[in-house]
Image (cartoon, grey):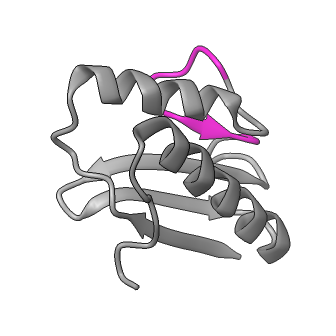
Amino acid sequence: MEQSITLNLSYDLSDSDWKKVMSVYKQMDGWIDNRDFPYWFGTEEDDQCITASIEPSGLVVTGNVNESVWFGWVTVLCSKLTLALSREIHDAES
């Protein structure tokens, strides 16, 4: 089941903040290193996958994982980003 969330993370972060975001990405369960795009657990060709892209609306995280994995993983991502960036990161639509 495909899931998606847009986080309140601006596309125009400073280089320093982007380094913090990348550090958080690499700490997350399922991180796949040495890709041009952030992936966790697999890529679009795999049964399970989470990916992220920065858009004008915010950081869009999409995934094809079961609901319990999705909610837990996104909760941890938001918590880690909040700590790293020293501001609350959450669903931009709520």
Residue at 40% x, 59% y is 60
Residue 76: quarter of image: bottom right
Q: Is residue 2 magenta?
A: no
Residue at 60% x, 73% y is 3
Whole-percent x, y for residue 4 in the image = 52, 71
Question: On screen, 23 above or below 85?
Answer: above
Residue 75: quarter of image: bottom right
Front position in the image: 19 or 35: 19
Q: In this view, does 20 lie to the left or right of 58?
A: right
Question: On screen, 18 above or below 42?
Answer: above
Report the span colored magenta: 33-42
Front position in the image: 62 or 68: 68
Q: In this view, does 93 lie to the left or right of 47?
A: left
Tell me the quarter of the image containing the C terminus.
Answer: bottom left
Question: On screen, 29 above or below 15?
Answer: below
Q: Does the magenta stretch include residue 34?
A: yes
Residue at 48% x, 70% y is 5
Whole-percent x, y for residue 13 in the image = 22, 37
Tell me the quarter of the image containing the N terminus.
Answer: bottom right
- Magenta stretch secondary structure, dominant: loop
Question: How many discs appear?
Answer: 0
